[in-house]
Amino acid sequence: MAPSIGFGGTERVVGRLANNLIKYYNVYLILMHNSVDLPIDKRVNIIFLTQKKEHFNNTKLNKALTFCRSLKNYHKAIKSNNISICISFLARQNIINGIYKLRVPKFKTIISERCFPSNTYGKINKQLVSFFYNKNDCLFSNSAHINTDLQQNFKLKIPAYVIYNPINTLNKNPNFNSYNCTKSTFKIIAIGRLNPVKNHKNLIKSMVYLNESFHLNIYGIGILKQDLIQLTKKLKVTNMVSLKGNSNSINTEILSHHCLVLPSLSEGFPNVILEAMSLGVPVIATNCMSGPLELLNDNEDVYIKQGEFFKAKYGLLVNVNDEEALAKAITYYKNNDDVRETYSRLSFNKAKQFDITKIELQVKDLIDNVLCAE
């Protein structure tokens, strides 16, 4: 169960897992919204809990009514299709699973947290998470830091596991030499919803430290689009920054750039870093909670001086909200082809650990263990 199947990181993970778990199970994809923008195998049964005319981003009353209808439709879907177990992703769906588990204790539920909770949820949601998460059979997240946060700050008592995001790495053989052509424009890519937590504002500010031999392309849509456009005008970097919207071929876009930058304030386990690594494209990321440290430095703690960057095992790390350090890291990549090629090879090999063929088996083992438990 997920909100929808779109361009977000969690939605892409759900789509990949559904398409691969059909090898072992009869899979139903239960979606809160009537929205599927990515390819789903025809053997996967899709159930929508709401119709396109129903929106959560409305009044509080409409949100509550839609949530209640979704819960009722979820109950019907489970019963009518004789579903044995449900894996839910993200807070609202996890809470629905918890509510249903209270009503039907014998039903098996697995929940999955994908964000760093303390940095994501407001007061009411924190209370709901603390209560309803513990009603489920178990939880898995995509970061050890997420599990620790849930246990320490949300009183999580159920078993908690870490299963990282899957990526398709087969048949990808990067042409590392193609990344070394930086004589004209050094192209930087950032990907993510245009909202405050993705912190594109800070990345745009970093462009002030650079010259017009650098160009930043930002892919994604969101509420801050006009604010970011105005910021580029205010900082006089309109010739150096482009807002590109969504792309149906994001891997192709990543491959056409010299490095990927993730400037986020907070993450769960950033798919965009994993996508870039699997393509052999060098990465720069903020050392935010959580994910970048696990991906780029095997979760080994680092100290990063303000205004500087850290050479991690598989990419460069900077402190959150440090535009000067971002600019230095970008410049370092531009001026050192050998370093970029080294990171390209290292990150490409690291990404193989997250191939879907390995991750799907971890999810399968978890499902089987929960189904077999008394």
Image (spheres, grey):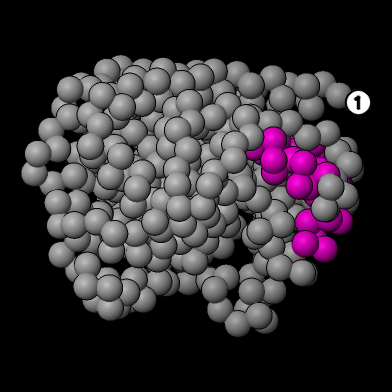
User: For mark 1, what is the residue?
Assistant: 374
138 relative position to 203: left or right = right
Q: Residue furthest left?
A: 184
Where on the picture, by quarter, is residue 92?
bottom right
Q: Quadrant of the C terminus?
A: top right
Q: Residue 173's spot in the image, x, y percent?
A: 27, 18
Magenta segment includes 370: no
**Visible residue check, residue 36:** no
- The amino acid marked with disc number 1 is Glu
Q: Residue 52's spot in the image, x, y percent?
A: 46, 66
Above or below, 107 against 4 in this view is: above
Above or below, 279 against 151 in this view is: above
Name the residue located 84 percent from the left edge and 47 percent from the top edge: 152
Where on the picture, by quarter, is residue 344?
top left
331 relative position to 329: left or right = left
Magenta segment includes 137: yes
179 relative position to 61: left or right = left
- Say which of 104 and 118 sits in front: 118
Give the crowd class for mark 1: few <14, some 14-19, many >=20 residues within 10 Å.
few
Q: Which residues are magenta?
A: 126-151
Name the residue located 33 percent from the left edge and 22 percent from the top edge: 342
Name the residue located 77 percent from the left edge and 69 percent from the top edge: 124
